[in-house]
Amino acid sequence: MFVFSVGNGGASETVLEVIPLFNRSASELLPLLQPALDSSDSLVSDGRQLVVKTSPERLGRIKQLLQQLDKPQQNLLITVLQGVQVNAEQLNSRAIRTYQTQELEKDSTQVLRTLNGNTAYIKTGQAYPVQKVQISQDRYGYPNVSTHTEYQPVSTGFAVVPQLLGQDVLLDIAPWSDTRRSNGQIQTQGTQSRITVKLGEWVELGAVNLQSYVEGDKKLARVWRTSDDERHILLKVDLAN
């Protein structure tokens, strides 16, 4: 470790220190330490070392953060529920921690095991054949009709970059979910978020409210009916054994 100090020991004192790293690279830790710096500070990555120029007080805070961050990377288990009617508060309540409904049988649940700090991606789905018709004219003006088949993908998944911070996890996550309707159209819900979550707790990333309207005739009256269907995107992160 190399330490260099300038100033007269007052508020303007600045120290320059080279801090060795033992488990993670400097490029990984650099963005996590930037929020702890002042605009006049400097933090540079140098392979397995960090070169810091800052005040003695902030240097102490940076070293405390490094004690938490410069550890062997852990495996994380990331669970995402998409398109479900239950919310995060219900899932976190002891009454339904053993959440088992028909929603889980519809492939709305995806679980991904990944290394802390790494980009991870999961995608499941299938492709449906769609008939395409093309009409053109020949040189004499007569119509030519040709058909071909294209395959339309319908998938569910998410991309995520997790960063473990003690008992919290910083996540950059982008889940999406496609649904093929009876008329062949594709309905998509998705979101992109950067959030901090607590280990083992369900959090809500977003919700979609689907409204339907039905009109019908009965013998003596005309009937209208509306219904609301709110679907949630939920997330939980656990430490993997």
Image (cartoon, rainbow, N blue to C red):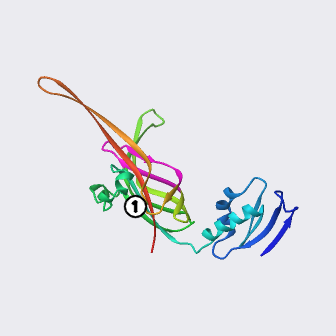
Magenta-colored segment: predominant secondary structure: strand
Residue 181 in the magenta stretch? The answer is yes
- The amino acid pointed to by label 1 is Gln
Residue 219 in sight from this viewpoint: yes
**214 or 172, nearer to the observer:** 172
Q: Which quarter of the rendered picture does the C terminus lie within? A: bottom left
Name the residue: 41% across, 39% down.
144
Q: What residue is disc 1 on?
A: 110
Residue 161, horizontal then vertical, whole percent:
55, 61
**196 or 10, nearer to the observer:** 10
Quarter-of-image position of residue 70:
bottom right
**197 or 219, nearer to the observer:** 197
Q: Which residues are magenta?
A: 172-195
Name the residue: 47% across, 63% down.
199
Residue at the extreme left? 219
Q: Is residue 194 above or below residue 69?
A: above
Q: Secondary structure at mark 1?
A: strand
**191 or 156, nearer to the observer:** 191
Q: Which quarter of the rendered picture does the N terminus lie within? A: bottom right
